[in-house]
Image (cartoon, rainbow, N blue to C red):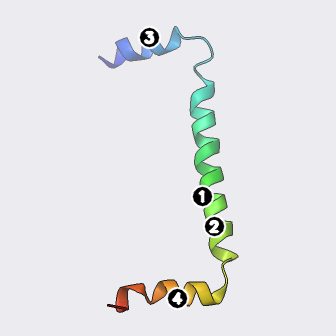
């Protein structure tokens, strides 16, 4: 089964770019999330951290 899939994928031109695009999107998302979290105002972080304790 795997040999069939591997052979089928190698017959498609330009298929090697898709894993690279997926990796770039994945890394960009988490870098963006990291930047967003570290630029949040402290007041907003304290408010969000209290959500589980509020009724």
Q: Residue at x 60, y 11 (%)?
A: 13
Identify the residue under disc 4: 47
Image: 43 above or below 16: below
Provide the secondary structure element on which disc 4 rests: helix
Q: Is residue 2 above or below residue 42?
A: above
The local crowd at label 4, few if under 14, some if 14 to 19, many if 20 or more residues have their Cα within 10 Å, is: few
Considering depth in this image, is 7 or 31 the residue closer to the camera?
31
Considering only order in the chain, which callout, 1 or 4, is on the residue closer to the N terminus? 1
SS assignment at label 2 = helix
Which badge, 4 or 2, is on the more N-terminal residue? 2
Query: Which is in the foreground here, disc 1 or disc 3?
Result: 1
Q: Residue at x 60, y 58 (%)?
A: 30
Pick the residue in front: 54 or 13. 54
Given contact means CB atoms under 8 Å apart, are the residues at marks 2 and 1 in contact? yes
Q: Which mark is residue 34?
A: 2
First of labels 1, 3 by sequence position: 3
- Alpha carbons under labels 2 and 3: distance apart: 39 Å
Q: Which residue is mark 3?
A: 7
Rounded to the nearest whole Å, what is the CA distance between mark 4 and mark 3? Answer: 54 Å
Number of other residues with Cα within 10 Å of mark 3, as a class: few under 14, some 14 to 19, many 20 or more = few
Q: Residues within 10 Å of mark 2 (few under 14, many from 20)?
A: few
């Amino acid at each position: 089964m795997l040999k069939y899939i591997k052979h089928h994928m190698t017959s498609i031109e330009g298929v090697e770019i898709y894993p690279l695009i997926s990796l770039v999107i994945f890394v960009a998302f988490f870098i963006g999330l990291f930047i967003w979290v570290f630029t949040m105002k402290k007041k907003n972080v304290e408010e969000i951290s209290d959500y589980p304790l509020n009724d």
